[in-house]
Amino acid sequence: MPQTTRPAGARSVLPAITPGHPAFVPRHTPDGPPSRGGTLRGPLHRPPRRPPRRPPRRTWLLARRGGGRTRPPGPYARLFTIPGTRAFTAGNLMARLPMGMFGVGAILMIAGTRGSYALAGAVTATGLAATAVVAPWTARLVDRYGQARVAVPATVLAVLGHLTLVLCVRADAPAWTLFAAYAATATCPNTGGMSRARWAHLLRDDPAARHTANAFEQAVDELCFMLGPVLAALLCSALFPEAGTLAASLLLLTGVLLFTAQRSTQPPVSRTAPGPAPLRAPGMRPLLVVFLATGAVFGSMEVVTLAYVDGPAGGAVLALQAAGSCAAGLVYGRVRRAAGLTGCLAAMTALMALPLLAAAGTGTVWALAPALLLAGMATAPTMVTGMTEIQRLTPAGRANEGMTLAVTALLGGIAAGSASGGWVVEHLGAATGYTVPVTAAALALTAAAATAGTRRAG
């Protein structure tokens, strides 16, 4: 072994390695002969560590502030990562906003030109009854032939009915023509049901995401019925009496065209739908009774609140209920485990007593407003849970028809609740009128509890 030397001042005790030493390994370049110098082989030598490279300043700042795209998307954001969902949702929002505009627009248009709120109310009630009869048949055709093939011509017929109503009002036509024209609008498709049917198809293997989608759709319903009447009243008062109906017709037709143009997300067509009709499905009829009583809560609350406030602030106070429902629906869509329908109705019955206590105890609008906000928070969770039950009981291939049956039951309940609330207000007073929504909620709770076993079996 050759003689080893140690450089002066060096602290290392390693022997000096020469090119002839066995531990010397020449360092090769990737494509050429060995280069000068070498590297050590064995545990006695460790190559020097390079200091970690600091990321760019912008990336470093985003990481420290919690920015960037490192966080996973929330449950609502994940819904719209599915291709096509943003497009059909945008079109459906435009088509659904008029649902809260047509009734108010027709009442203001007829009352403003004919000077009769009784005539205006009777015309809109006729249209509501006609829709309750025609809507299930329209939904059945949608399931059988596809949303685009049926919804577009049905919307055109409904828009023509609204335009005919405008012409009859402007031409001072006989009163019966107003009833006939508004009845022709019953072919309007259930745009909310078609949107829910798309979500049910896209998320058929993900119950948690389907629950979130139903909560989103319910929040959209509340938002449209909160903003639609305000927009219609603003247009009718600022421009001319027919402006609300004309604007709503344009929005409806444009929105349906945009919605149905998204063919990739629509449910498959089933011309020979398997299984029985949704109305004959086990557990469906008891559930529709629950929806009927729930609709009476909505209809009576609207009439009683407008009569109690009795002024221009009535619409704003009533909108608080829709605002509370919208907020609660969005929060409810984020929970991982949904509540049962009986539990939601129990909460609704308890919260619907708050407006009664505020009106009978204080008699001031300032106490009624927060009570309505809190009462509305039980609405969306109840509707989300109920619609989920409807989807579960509806046979495959008939989603639109099943959800339209639920909407029809709600419309019937709204009409009955409006009539009952108006009668109690007229004979017993506005504050006493708040007993009607509490009673209707209690009836819905009783029906849900009594038929819980039947619905589970279905």
Image (spheres, rainbow, N blue to C red):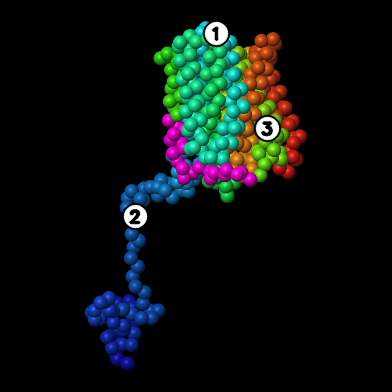
Residue that appears at 57% across and 43% down: 271
In the image, the segment drawn in magenta is 254-274
In the current view of this chain or complex, which residue is farthest to the bottom? 1
Q: Position of residue 437 (x, y in %)?
A: 67, 22
Q: Nearer the viewer, residue 153 or 305?
A: 153
Residue at figure coordinates x 47%, y 23% from the top left:
160
Q: List x then y, in percent, for residue 333.
A: 56, 39
As helix, strand or loop, the secondary structure at mark 1 comes to loop
Q: For the residue labelled by badge 2, is the local secondary structure a helix, a strand or a loop?
A: loop
Residue 352, given in percent of the width and then of the height, sits at 66, 25
Disc sitting over residue 55 in the figure: 2
Tag of residue 260:
none
Give the amino acid at mark 1: Ser
Could one spot residue 232 in this view of the protein? Answer: no
The reply to whether discs 3 and 2 touch (Cβ–Cβ < 8 Å) is no
Residue found farthest to the top: 115
Other residues around mark 3 within 10 Å, as few (<14) / some (14–19) / many (≥20)? many
* Horizontal and vertical percent position of residue 151: 50, 34
Residue assigned mark 3: 288
Q: Is residue 108 above or below residue 450?
A: above
Is residue 330 inside the magenta stretch? no
In the picture, which quadrant includes the C terminus? Answer: top right
Q: Quadrant of residue 452?
A: top right
Sequence-wise, which precedes: disc 1 or disc 2?
A: 2
Q: CA distance from mark 3 to mark 2?
A: 60 Å
Where does label 1 land, which residue? 116
Q: Nearer the viewer, residue 223 or 119?
A: 119
